[in-house]
Image (tube, rainbow, N blue to C red):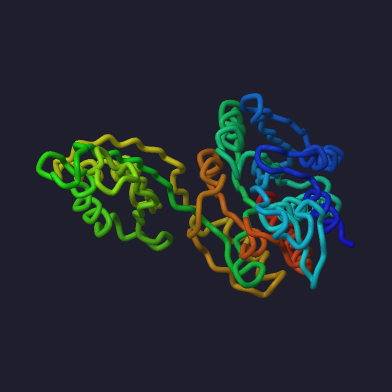
Amino acid sequence: MSSALRLTEQLISQRTVTPADGECQSILAGRLAPLGFACETMLSGPDGFRVTNLWARRPGRGARTLVFAGHTDVVPTGPLEQWHSDPFVPSHRDGLLYGRGAADMKTSIAAFTVAVEEFLAAKPDPALSIALLLTSDEEGPSVDGTVVVCQRLQERGEQLDYCIVGEPTSVERLGDMIKNGRRGSLTGKLTVKGIQGHIAYPQLAKNPIHLVLPALDEMATTEWDWGNDYFPPTSWQISNIHGGTGAGNIIPGTVVVDFNFRFASVSTAEDLQKRVHDILDRHALDYELAWTVGGQPFLTTPGELVGAVQAAIRDETGLETELSTTGGTSDGRFISRICPQVIEFGPLNASIHKIDEHVRVADIEPLKNIYRRVLENLDAQAAT
């Protein structure tokens, strides 16, 4: 059994539903410290939702730093009776390794940890500085995890040059896709006010559902932007509509509409908010609107990091990887504030957050090798 597979199994066996870390970060720090890493645990969050973060850094001879980032927390298992094996007991069936977090993202963490071990065994005095940033608050609120570590690093003036987030990005084959950016997320909670009344006397009431429909139709048909070479056009979608008392003979007094933008880097949250308010005001609605910016978009154009990862994937698998910015948000949105080049790369994502989450056992060694090859590629650049 390979070292990366053993470590993956060890991490899966830790029950780490957000914000729990179990012993994951202690296990990893125990492997990194003997390699010369300074391991710093940063606890954050209130009692009852204590988040564990690990920042481990090993200086190199040069000025460049590569960070491997990931999360040790996992989503809840769902109904245990629907799993074919205990989600926190790593289990093998038909060439697959099952367990919660297998794909998202304990395999990646194990793979890049062992990749670092192998790289330093072969090159104990590299030019490249290496760091790991791990959190137990990625699948939860994400307010006491990576964002806190990044704030502290920024306050200390620590410089980061490259970051690989071990999110599961592959689709059909390991290495067929990496994420070189992510769209921003902007959520609105719109409350439109009317006048409640008897449904048989509409002249004495004011139906807020009827009033808001033309504005919603306009927002649904608006072209917010046209995207660019890396991002699809910005998307606006309604997620929930709540109106009425449940009775069939009452016109409601209010309607609440939840909606979300997934926006490209060509738009800003501020501009999208203004355009929504302009539409609502033009329709003369009596409304309140609360905004939440879930994440800003980020983009890493082809350059040193993208090239190093593409070359590593090509050399290990023979694939020409696809660059993509699709999907949800990740902690890359926080890291990109202090690191100019951020990409995401990891195993297949087909089973993430599902019952019987799994990875292909045959992908674990190649994934580790790709991470090691990236270290070698970037170290060669740092040495020049």
| Vertical side of 19 occupied by 12: above or below | below
Q: Is residue 258 left or right of residue 62?
A: left
Quarter occupied by residue 346 = bottom right
Q: Is residue 4 left or right of residue 156?
A: right
**Percent x, y of residue 30:** 85, 39
The residue nearer to you, when weighing 216 against 272, is: 216
**Percent x, y of residue 36:** 82, 38
Residue at far top of view: 47
Residue at far left of view: 203
The residue nearer to you, when weighing 225 against 33, is: 225
| Vertical side of 244 occupied by 49: above or below | above
Quarter occupied by residue 104 = bottom right
Q: Is residue 157 left or right of residue 52?
A: left
Query: Residue at horizontal 58%, vertical 56%?
Result: 304
Quarter occupied by residue 65 = top right
**Is residue 66 among the parts visible in the rendering?**
no
**Percent x, y of residue 158:** 61, 33
**Percent x, y of residue 162:** 60, 48
Query: Residue at horizontal 79%, vertical 55%?
Result: 86
The residue nearer to you, when weighing 281 against 253, is: 253
